[in-house]
Amino acid sequence: MSHAGAGAVRRAAPFGRRFREHAAPGATGVRPRPNWRPAGRLKSAGVAGSNPVGRVCTSSPNPERPRAAAGRLEKLENTTRPVRLFSLNRPRQFDARARRKLSLALYLALTWGCLWPNSDWAQTPGRSSGAATNRVLLIFSEARDLPGNVMMEQAARGAMLANTTNRIEFFSESMDASRFSTPQHDQLFQAYIRENYGAHNLDLIVMFMGRSFLLAQELAAPGMPPVPALAVVVNDLELPDLPGGRKFAGLVQRFDVRGTVEFILQLQPQTRRVVVVGGTAPADQAVLASIADTARSVEGVRFDYWTNRPLNEVYQAATLLPQDTVILLGTVLRDAAGEPSYTTHVVQTLAPLASVPVYVLGNSLIGSGAVGGTVVDFENLGASVGKLASRLLAGTPISRISLQVRSNGIPMADWRALQRWHIESRRLPANCVVLYRPHSLWEEHGYLFLAIGLGFLAQAVTIAALLIQRRRNREAEAEILRQRTELAHASRVSMMGQLASALTHELNQPLGAILRNAEAAEVYLQSERPDLKEVQAILADIRRDDKRAGDVIDRMRSLFKRQKLVLANLDMRDLLEDTIAMVRPDAAARQIHLKVVVPPDLPAAQGDRVHVQQVLFNLIFNAMDALVGVPDPRRSLTVEAAGTKHGNVQISVRDCGAGIAPEHAARIFEPFFTTKSNGMGMGLAISKTIVEAHGGEIWMRSCAMEGTTFTFLLPPAGGDKVRPGDLPPSLQAN
């Protein structure tokens, strides 16, 4: 393995197989290790038969592996798979094809070296290839794959790599003192460390200890490499004296028993009994002593100690505990039978079976069913020792690194266990770390949901504003339409004032005829033999004159009504005849020659009868007013209607007056613009609005000597808009 990388790791095989070569022949007292097994078939190299190089030893099995793998491990322990190596002394194994492959590989390697002579494949980013290399040995008093040891090792390595620019080469060893606790084993371990690492020029040794301080005492013994050593201790034992007057340097973490008891009572204030489960090892007894000291200061809660019971009895009894009881699990490094044990195994079995919540002292035990506690944070502990190690690697003397003793823990809880035991999360301390809590979508994507909500809110506000504006626009349009209708009605009433004399003449004629016919009928009836046929003829004349007077009144009434625009098919010939009949008396009074040109085949148009008549009245009366001052022989007005080639109906009103000045022509249809001294300026504006409401167009053409012509188009019957082919070029461009 290359050591060029910053995190390069040399994992030596557990010393158990290798250091036995240093024992004297025939030495006794060495406990056999049945768990040593071959590593299996290697991919590139191996041995045939009994070649010792082909057997690779691996570390002892993880005591915390699931039981499902136990059978497979035992089967592997008794299996040996020899692997054959190629022998370069056997030519038939190195044929022409193999030589070609080897030549190609060598050619590629040489090419790479020529093109990139300074490349370093194992170089870690941020660390130059010329940086110094530090060698650090990590030694565990127990199996290094225990959860707590794994957490501390990873955190320590990460902290050391983060605080230096040098390359670091890590070595790791495990003493496994819980299963191999004989003096001979300790001597072999010392010899193994001394001879295997004496020539490696180690810069630092980091010791991870839990059950005892034996590892520190062995590394401080005479003859061991004089390398600075940091200790990481997690137990409640008293610190012993080291050989040679050496002092401990590093971190000692005590269990926060008082904090855990307070944690229990805060989560379950109804607790009246605490069952303490612990082991019989010295480290276990130290933890039990700390629990007993804390129990004496807690009132109203009884502490029962299940320390001398076999674990099987503990598991069975835990299933029958009452509801006001909890279990506090200390450390179980040796059970009541004196056999080595692991606390992780105990909690994995006890927590699922117990009828009450289980509380623990280390965060490596959370996740197997325990509720939690004020626990030792192994990751934080490993990071802290990693920072101390970085100071030593940077050149700080070991004498300036003091021993730090910590007794405070961190409140931690398993969310799943809280839900299982119906413990309210609001009872947790404010600084409690909650593990395995499922995050809601709001917690994971709250900002995204907030942005989307704000977007929808902005859209909703915009849509609401648009709807309000639309409603206001419609209300404004309705108000404008109402005012326009009122103004059109007022214009019609004003025109009726102008037609008063004509109306008097129109009504006087039929009424006078009725009177004379009635008198004649009376004379005939006074004779002895009245002529009944003549009387019948007189009555027919009276009926005809009465209908004539009624038609005049009906026409006047229709003009005075307030009504909305109602489009229908209009007989334009009939509409023009009625309109001309109403304005002819006024034209005669003004001595104006009124000429009407209407073809017999004039097509029907789409429109409202009353409003179209109003347009005609406005145009005819404006033409009559334009003829004031014109000599009598030239005083004429022409109303002409015709169908266009595109199917529209075109109506023109032409006078022979003085015309409209060019500067006034552009504004002639604007509201309140007039060229008459007594005009309101609304007649033509209303006429333009009415024509456009019909889907038509109106325009004007004026010449100074020929007069003015107003023309408007109406769509054909059934149409909603005029066809643009009949419009003048100025309107077609618009």
Image: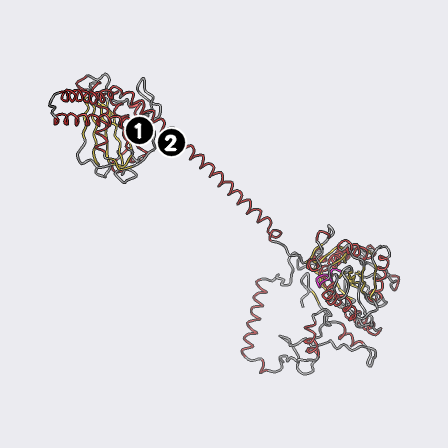
Q: Nearer the viewer, residue 702 or 211?
A: 702
Mark 2 → mark 1, Cα distance in angstroms:
14 Å
Q: Position of residue 403 (x, y in %)?
A: 83, 56
Question: Relative to residue 382, is residue 563 drawn left or right?
Answer: left
Q: Earlier in the sequence, mark 2 or mark 1?
A: 2
Residue plotted at (54% across, 75% down)? 100
- For the residue marked with disc 1, what is the amino acid? Ser
Task: Give the labeled residue for mark 2.
Answer: 481
Q: What's drawn in magenta, residue-wise?
A: 362-369
Q: Residues within 10 Å of mark 2 (few under 14, many from 20)?
A: some
Task: Give the labeled residue for mark 1.
Answer: 687
Give the main secondary structure, helix, strand or loop, of the magenta stretch: loop
Q: Position of residue 280 (x, y in %)?
A: 84, 68
Q: Which numbered dot is residue 509?
A: none
Helix, strand or loop at disc 1?
Answer: helix
Up the image or down, 487 lies above or below 244; here it is above
Question: Relative to residue 518, is residue 487 drawn left or right?
Answer: right
**Residues under numbered marks 2 and 1 in contact, where contact means CB atoms less than 8 Å apart:** no
Residue plotted at (75% across, 75% down)? 17
Q: Quadrant of residue 287?
A: bottom right
Quadrant (top left/top right/bottom left/bottom right) for the C terminus? top left
Q: Nearer the viewer, residue 188 or 227?
A: 188
Residue 365 counted in the magenta span: yes
Q: Residue furthest front?
A: 528
